[in-house]
Amino acid sequence: MATFTEIKNQVEEKIKNIKSFKIGKTGQQMKDRFDNKYKDEYSNYEELGWSNERNVIDNAEEFLIKEFINNMKCKNEQIGSGEMKESKKYIIYIVWN
């Protein structure tokens, strides 16, 4: 996985040309997570990174949301939350319009 700062830079570039976005984490397959939670509100998703270690993804999500929560396009309502299903692969992602 890239460093948290590299991922932040990737997100900064992506959000220049979008209307709204949300950052999240999951232990599910990304398509399943998108279809179950976001498909009615967002039209796109992308994995930003992954790890076999849950705490790495928890920390990545917290870092990214802290960086972007004050951006008017960011629709995250709080910094870090939610449990992830037990998994062999944990994913940090962005959904956007």
Image (cartoon, grey):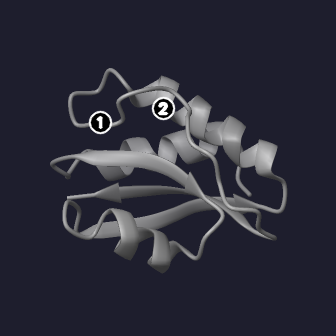
* Nearer the observer, 66 or 13: 66
Q: Quadrant of the N terminus?
A: bottom right
Instruction: Give the class, few, some or many, for how many residues have Cα within 10 Å of label 1's Cα (few <14, many ≥20).
Output: some
Mark 1 vs mark 2, CA separation in Å: 9 Å
Which residue sits at x=68%, y=61%?
A: 85
Going by the numbered disc 2, the residue's amino acid type is Ile
Going by the numbered disc 1, the residue's amino acid type is Cys
Instruction: Give the class, few, some or many, for how many residues have Cα within 10 Å of label 2's Cα (few <14, many ≥20).
Output: many
Quadrant of res 29: bottom right
Measured from the top left, where is residue 70 in percent x and y?
A: 32, 20
Which residue sits at x=45%, y=66%?
A: 46
SS for dot 1: loop
Numbered label tally: 2
> For mark 2, what is the residue?
65
Measured from the top left, where is residue 7 in percent x and y?
A: 57, 47
Quadrant of res 27: bottom right
Which residue sits at x=77%, y=45%?
A: 56
Q: Residue 24 carries which label?
A: none
Position of 16 with respect to 32 (left or right) is: left
Q: Which mark is residue 74?
A: 1
Contact between labelled residues 2 and 1, with CB atoms less than 8 Å apart: yes
Q: Quadrant of the C terminus?
A: bottom left
Which residue sits at x=60%, y=70%?
A: 28
